[in-house]
Amino acid sequence: MYISIIIPVYNRPDEIKELLESLLISDYNKEYEIVIIEDGSSVTCKKEVELFKDRLNLFYYFKENSGPGDSRNYGMKVAKGNYFIIFDSDCIIPRQYLTEVEKELTANYVDCFGGSDAALDSFSDIQKAINFAMTSFLTTGGIRGGSEKLTKFQPRSFNMGISKKAFENSNGFGNIHPGEDPDLTIRLWKLGYETRLFPKAFVYHKRRIDWDKFSAQVNKFGKARPILNSWYPEYSKLTFFLPTLFILGFSAAVFFFLFGFELPILCFAFYFLLLFISASIQNKSIKIGILSLIAVSKQFFGYGRGFLESYIKVILLKQKPEVAFSELFFKVKS
């Protein structure tokens, strides 16, 4: 097995530098290559890549902007490996990562895997709070890698591996973004490939976003889900409706509270208390516990509104997703 690491980047030279610095101290003792695809950036990372040319087996490509999914496909087409590992540029890789991947593939080979993410102590408090919102079992139920009990794990493209054979048979990522990773996973399942969580192959996901960008991001996640449900109705789940039901239920609880019925709002208060305690203990910080409440609120309300809007337009009104939400689709150029 020869590994090719695929990293798309868009206007983030500092992130690439951090990522490559983390790979310098990898304990993996076999040869591998790193393929960086500059997705039409106006601020390129070419100078940063040059700093590592004599210490890492690096290949740099510049292409027109066509989105992260198409850039990953481009990287896998030009890579020499027979197994690809895909990272986002805002990831920092633990030194044991590649060794853990090899252990898992040797013990129980799978053509596609995913790993989870964590936060470093050096991350900002907001980044840690967002990390809690995105990874806690209390918020996402483990779908991003926090649970080893998942029977059909959907890898996320910030930390994902796929064999060359599976990539070629599936044609890789589609042009929807976000949503390109579950779309690829479902198509792999339909082709007979299995996916699995590698619990020890985690990355430190820096999440370069502030509150406004986080709200916009999760809103797009919500919009993408009904589109995926319309493409693959057999993989639709009731749990996908939970954020929308949450905001509708919260609105109803506030209404009832105004008329003296307190039980519903107390249930929500208890849930947020659990979130606060869990986030505070996990991060050893009351401040991050408080910020996590903001993160979870933005996560649920952003995703829930996006899901509801998309469900009405795509599922009920039968609008074409590419027309209803053109901002979610890149024009493929590679």
Image (cartoon, rainbow, N blue to C red):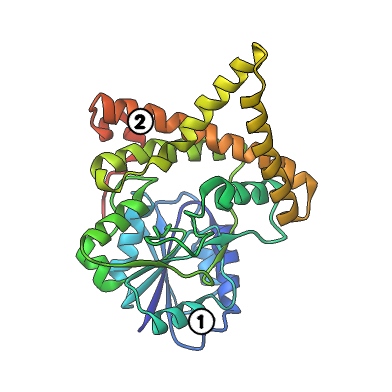
| Label placed on residue 236 | none
How far across and down, in percent of the image, does residue 203 sit? 55, 65
Furthest residue in direction bottom, as rendered: 29
For disc 2, the neighbor class at 10 Å (few under 14, some 14 to 19, many from 20) is many
Q: Nearer the viewer, residue 94 or 142?
A: 142
Q: Is residue 270 visible?
A: yes
- Count of labels in the image: 2
The local secondary structure at tag 1 comes to helix
Q: Earlier in the sequence, mark 2 or mark 1?
A: 1
In the displayed structure image, the side of residue 99 where residue 288 appears, left or right: right
Circle 2 residue = 310
Q: Nearer the viewer, residue 180 or 16?
A: 180
In the displayed structure image, the side of residue 79 where residue 95 appears, left or right: right
- Which quarter of the figure is the N terminus placed in? bottom left
| Label placed on residue 99 | 1
Rounded to the nearest angstrom, the CA distance separating label 2 from label 1 is: 41 Å
Q: Amino acid at mark 1?
A: Thr
How far across and down, in percent of the image, does residue 124 sit? 70, 51
